[in-house]
Image (cartoon, rainbow, N blue to C red):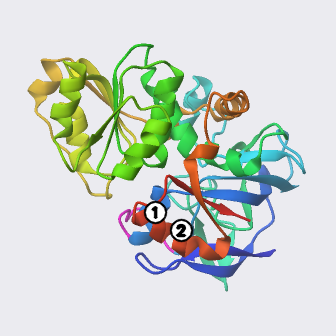
C-alpha cells in the first residue's frame, strides 16, 4: 500500500513527509494504523547525525499507538481492530533472555538498527529501500511490525495518551521500578527533565522515593519536574549539581539517573552518588562518546554503574500495567504532552524538541 511518512534521506538533512510504499504483513507480522506518535530525542539523534550507527534513509518514530489493520499468517496474540501500543523491542519469547523475563535482551532481535528481525525492511521510496527507526517507524500513517511489537490494551484507554507508554513512559518509569528497583524512602537525583526524565521522576513518586531531585539547565523544564513529583530542583547552569545534591541529601543520592545524552551529566551523576549508590544510564550521547572514572571511586565506595534499556521492560506485562496505573489516576501522562503536531509538521516538531521547548510532543493523525 501507499502511505505518507516522515523520512530522513541523509543525516542532517531536513525531515520530509513523503509518499512511501509499505508491504503487507508477512507471517508473524501485523499492520497498524497509527493514531499518534511521540516526538523522541532518539529520532532527533538519528536525524541530526549524532547517532552514526543508525542507517539512512529512514522513516522516523519509535513511540506510538494505533489500531490493528491487518494480520499475517500465524498471528495469534492480536487481531484486526485491536487497540495496541507499539514496542520498539521485538521479542521471540523463546530464547534464554525471554525465558528468564528479560525480553529487551532477546537474542533474536534485529541484528542491527533499521531492520526487522528477519534482516529486511517493509518500506520503499520510489524503489529505494527505507529503514525502520526503532523497528516501528511510527511517524507514518501505517506501520508493519512483528507481532511481538503490537501489545494489545484496553479499548477505553485513549490511544493518543497510550502512545507515550511505547517509549518515554516505559523507559523512564521502568528504569525506577524494574532496572533500579528503588525502595521506598531512597533518595534519587534525575539528570535531564525531558520526556524520559519526567517519567523517571514519576517512577520515583510511585515508589515513594524521597527526596526526588531534578537537575536540568532549563528552568521551564524544572517547572515541569515539580509538577510531576520532584521535591527539589537544581539549575545546573547556575550551580554545581554534585554539590547541590550532596547538600540536599547530606551524603549523596542513593540512586542517580541520567536521562540526557550528555557525557558531563554522566560524570556528574556518578560523582553525586552516596557510597553504595547506583547510577542508571538511560540517555545516550553521540555514538563514539566515552566516559571515565577512577577505579577507586568504584571499588572503595561499592558504587554501581548500570544501563537501562527500555526500562528493562517486560512489554506484555508492563504496558497493560502502566495503562491501569494511568486509568487509576496514579500515572500522569496527559500532563507530559505540551504540544501536538500533524504529520506534515514533523520537521517543526523536531525543531521544537531541539530548542528545548517540549516536555513531550505528539504527532497526531
In the rendering, at what x and y percent does residue 131 appear?
58, 68
- Nearest the eye: 271 or 228: 228
Q: What residue would you read off at disc 1? A: 353
Whether residue 32 is visible: yes
In the rendering, at what x and y percent does residue 180 appear?
42, 24
In the rendering, at what x and y percent does residue 250 appear?
19, 18
Task: Say above or below: 112 vs 99.
Answer: below
Q: What residue would you read off at disc 2? A: 349
> Quick check: 299 left or right of 304?
left
Residue 320's label in the rendered image is none
In the image, what residue occupies the spot 90% across and 50% down?
81
> Quick check: 246 left or right of 176?
left
Residue at far bottom of view: 126
Question: Of helix, strand and loop, which one carries label 1?
Answer: helix
Q: Main secondary structure of the magenta part?
A: loop
Question: Of helix, strand and loop, which one carries label 2?
Answer: helix
In the image, what residue occupies the spot 67% across and 35% down?
319
- Nearest the eye: 235 or 131: 235
Image quarter of residue 249? top left
Q: Which residues are magenta?
A: 49-56
Crowding around mark 2 (Cα neighbors within 10 Å: few <14, some 14 to 19, many 20+) is many
Whether residue 197 is visible: no
Q: Quarter of the image containing the N terminus?
A: bottom right
Badge 1 vs badge 2, beta-carbon distance below 8 Å: yes
In the rendering, at what x and y percent does residue 76 appear?
85, 40
Give the spatial CA distance, label 1 vs label 2: 6 Å
Crowding around mark 1 (Cα neighbors within 10 Å: few <14, some 14 to 19, many 20+) is some
Is residue 308 part of the magenta span, yes or no?
A: no
In the image, what residue occupies the spot 82% across and 46% down?
83
Q: Quarter of the image containing the C terminus?
A: bottom right
Amino acid at each position: 500500500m501507499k502511505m505518507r511518512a516522515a523520512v530522513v534521506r541523509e543525516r542532517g538533512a531536513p525531515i520530509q513527509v513523503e509518499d512511501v510504499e509499505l508491504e503487507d504483513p508477512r507471517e508473524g507480522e501485523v499492520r497498524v494504523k497509527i493514531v499518534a506518535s511521540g516526538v523522541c530525542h532518539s529520532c532527533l539523534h538519528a536525524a541530526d547525525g549524532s547517532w552514526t550507527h543508525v542507517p539512512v534513509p529512514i522513516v522516523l518514530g519509535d513511540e506510538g499507538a494505533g489500531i490493528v489493520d491487518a494480520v499475517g499468517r500465524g498471528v495469534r496474540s492480536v487481531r484486526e481492530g485491536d487497540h495496541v501500543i507499539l514496542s520498539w523491542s521485538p521479542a521471540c519469547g523463546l530464547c534464554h533472555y525471554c525465558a528468564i523475563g528479560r525480553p529487551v535482551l532477546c537474542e533474536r532481535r534485529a541484528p542491527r538498527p533499521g531492520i526487522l528481525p528477519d534482516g529486511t525492511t517493509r518500506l520503499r521510496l520510489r524503489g529505494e529501500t527505507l529503514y525502520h527507526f526503532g523497528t516501528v517507524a511510527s511517524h507514518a500513517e501505517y506501520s508493519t511490525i512483528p507481532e511481538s511489537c503490537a501489545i494489545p490494551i484496553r479499548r477505553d484507554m485513549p490511544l493518543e495518551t497510550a502512545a507515550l507508554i511505547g517509549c518515554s513512559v516505559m523507559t523512564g518509569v521502568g528504569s525506577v521500578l524494574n532496572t533500579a528497583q528503588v525502595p521506598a524512602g531512597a533518595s534519587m537525583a534525575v539528570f535531564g527533565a525531558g520526556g524520559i526524565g519526567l517519567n523517571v521522576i514519576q517512577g520515583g513518586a510511585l515508589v515513594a522515593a524521597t527526596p526526588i531531585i531534578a537537575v536540568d539547565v532549563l528552568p521551564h523544564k524544572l517547572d515541569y519536574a515539580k509538577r510531576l513529583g520532584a521535591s527539589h530542583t537544581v539549575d545546573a547552569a547556575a550551580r554545581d549539581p554534585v554539590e547541590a545534591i550532596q547538600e540536599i541529601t547530606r551524603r549523596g543520592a542513593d540512586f542517580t539517573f541520567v536521562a540526557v545524552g550528555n557525557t558531563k551529566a554522566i560524570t556528574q551523576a556518578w560523582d553525586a552518588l552516596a557510597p553504595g549508590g547506583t547510577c542508571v544510564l538511560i540517555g545516550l550521547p553521540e555514538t563514539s562518546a566515552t566516559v571515565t572514572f577512577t577505579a577507586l571511586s568504584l571499588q572503595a565506595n561499592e558504587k554501581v554503574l548500570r544501563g537501562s534499556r527500555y526500562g528493562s521492560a517486560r512489554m506484555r506485562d508492563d504496558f497493560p500495567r502502566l495503562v491501569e496505573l494511568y486509568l487509576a489516576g496514579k500515572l500522569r501522562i496527559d500532563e507530559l504532552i505540551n504540544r501536538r503536531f500533524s504529520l506534515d509538521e514533523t520537521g517543526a516538531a523536531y525543531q521544537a524538541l531541539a530548542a528545548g521547548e517540549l516536555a513531550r510532543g505528539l504527532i497526531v493523525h
